Amino acid sequence: MSLTRVHLRQDGQTLVAGLLAPRVLQRGPTCLEVALVATNATLLGGDHVRIELAVDAGMHLVIRDVAGTVAYHSRGREAWWDNEIDVAEGASLVWRAEPLVLSQGASVRRTTHATVAEGGRLLMRDTLVLGRSGETGGDIVCDTELTYAGRPALVERLDLADATLPGMLGAHRVIDTVTLLGARPAATTRAFRLAQPGAVARAVGIRAHDTALDATFEEWATQIGAQSWRG
Amino acid sequence: MSGIAALLLADARLPAGGHTQSAGLEPALLGGLEPTDIPGFLRTRLATSARVDAATAVVTRAGAPVEQVLDAWAARTPSEVVRAAAVEAGRGYLRLARTLGMPTSLLPRDTPRPIALGSLARDLGLAAAEVARVAIYDDLQTACAAALKLAPMDPATPVGWLLACADPIDEAVADVAKLTEPQQIPATTAPLMELWQHAHSTATRRLFRA
Amino acid sequence: MPETRALRLGIAGPVGTGKSSLIALLCRELGGTIELGVVTNDIYTDEDARMLRAAGVLDPDRIRAVETGACPHTAIRDDITANAIAIEDLESDYPATELVLIESGGDNLTATFSPALVDAQIFVLDVAGGGDVVRKGGPGIARADLLVVNKTDLAPHVGVDADRMRREGEQAREGRPVIALSRNDADSIAALTSWVRHLLARHRHGEHVATDPGPMAPHFHADGTVHAH
């Protein structure tokens, strides 16, 4: 297993490099902006990537992916990817993730667990692309489990092994999701309003960058005050 | 009691407002689902939302705390439009329970259909597998019945679709009937179906509530 | 707070006979003195409810729509669940409500409300539907609490004798009331509102008993009794 860890504390941060290496881009009194840089040709069959992101109370962490990730043909071995996220009271985490492209023959199991304490905020992007151009794309099962203030906020299994089943993705090859936890967005934004404070904006599309969720992500980032954290 | 109770709960003639529902079929057809894909759509529901709801009913029937079941179900039903429609459908069961003096009538007014159904099943002494089967059957049969209104065909045809799902329904029933805890409820989603259902609240010429 | 629960008055009748307009009229005429609520049963979505909300005759939140899954007959007759819930919600949100008007989804001549859903019902025909509609009969025409022959101002234009239609209605109804209504005829409007106010008073005093017009004509049973189911 390859562990990448970013833990932002009031008195500093812990950075652990794995297949993805954290690089500090910017630092402020209560904020940290980190890029995750691929150190190898991710993601191959048998790889097990684990990313741990933790933000202590009152701190703000912004994560950027430098590039999208390509999951290559698994050659019969699954690749695993686990995200473990912990956002404390009054803390924020914004993860500007780039697309995960599933090549023909790729087989990926991904889990995302996030625990957000009351008053904490989490904003993240998840773009899955089935296949590089001309391919039908690989398989992925994504298990997402997010809790807010100790209560389940979003629990979802997205199993794209049979993506063409009616009602799954149809002819679309891209599924793009922006998830916000700890704040309720403006009524005008097209999104699912979760029962707990939070929302999910989702779109399906043909190409990676035509789903129009960039604007939603920026709007929600502004709403939780991400602009004010710098410097 | 459960001998006829399971049949009653699965019967479209049960006065619980079932005729206002299409189990996501009308939103799907408005969203672009081809009528020829309705059998596949049933498979998708069976693998996703129908299974989530059936498991929710089973866990409710098993006696799990309703607030926890509600949290678990709501976390697996992200669209507020879908949740609101489920609450309206649940009201039909609560009203039935009230008229008949059953404990389910004490549930809060915003209890969604799967929890109301699970609770009613508990009142009526249904076994876990029975309530699971009723929940799944009702969901798929609701879509089949709505299909006759929305894309008319020989009414025997949807019966064939449903029968073709018999084995996978049995498998789903076996999967969910053993569950007892809210966190065990499956969470498999069908993204397009969910988006279609979410858009239904603003559809202008719809026949069905959901 | 009214001492009794709100009077539930159903408005049934074929498509296009003016049920929504009749409700708008009642809201305008009675809204100032009676606490009203409206439940519509729409063919599509909530279009009748939207039309009424747009008419501005009543607080939009007091107008609720029931979507019937293309079963307007079922929704007012056999499985009244969705309508009953809509009415109960209205009454619970506005406890002072005195009169709830329930508009059926436009259906054919056989659709009538269940007495479990409404205390009384008005059946609406219009002159444009043809002078012989009354003679064709049906449970609503024969036995609704009130028959309204609507749009009498159009009668000359469609070659119908509105008076004759009203008379034939009275004959078919064995003395039950008929009102020939035109929105341009103040007397006919007064007759309608007076009928509703009178019904409301009887309801409050417990003198009104809901009766079922039935889906069928009255018929004889072997024991000699006459039934109007």
Image (cartoon, coloured by chain):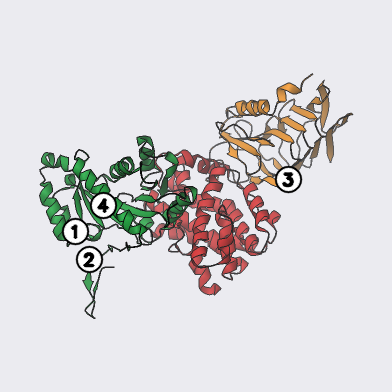
Chain colours: A orange, B red, C green
Q: Secondary structure at mark 2?
A: loop
In the visual, does C93 lie left or right of A217?
A: left
| 3D distance between C-alphas at marks 3 and 4 | 80 Å
Find out whether the residues at labels 1 and 2 contact each other: C-beta distance under 8 Å.
Answer: yes
Query: Residue B167: in sight, yes or no?
Result: no
Residues flagged by tags 1 and 2 on a common chain: yes
Q: What amino acid does circle 3 point to? A: Gly
Residue topped by disc 2: C217
Residue topped by disc 4: C195
Q: What amino acid does circle 4 point to? A: Trp
List x then y, in percent, for residue B88.
50, 52
Q: Secondary structure at mark 3?
A: loop
| 3D distance between C-alphas at marks 1 and 3 | 75 Å
Residue topped by disc 3: A76
Q: Earlier in the sequence, mark 4 or mark 1?
A: 1
Residue topped by disc 1: C137
Query: Nearest the camera: A82 or A191?
Result: A191
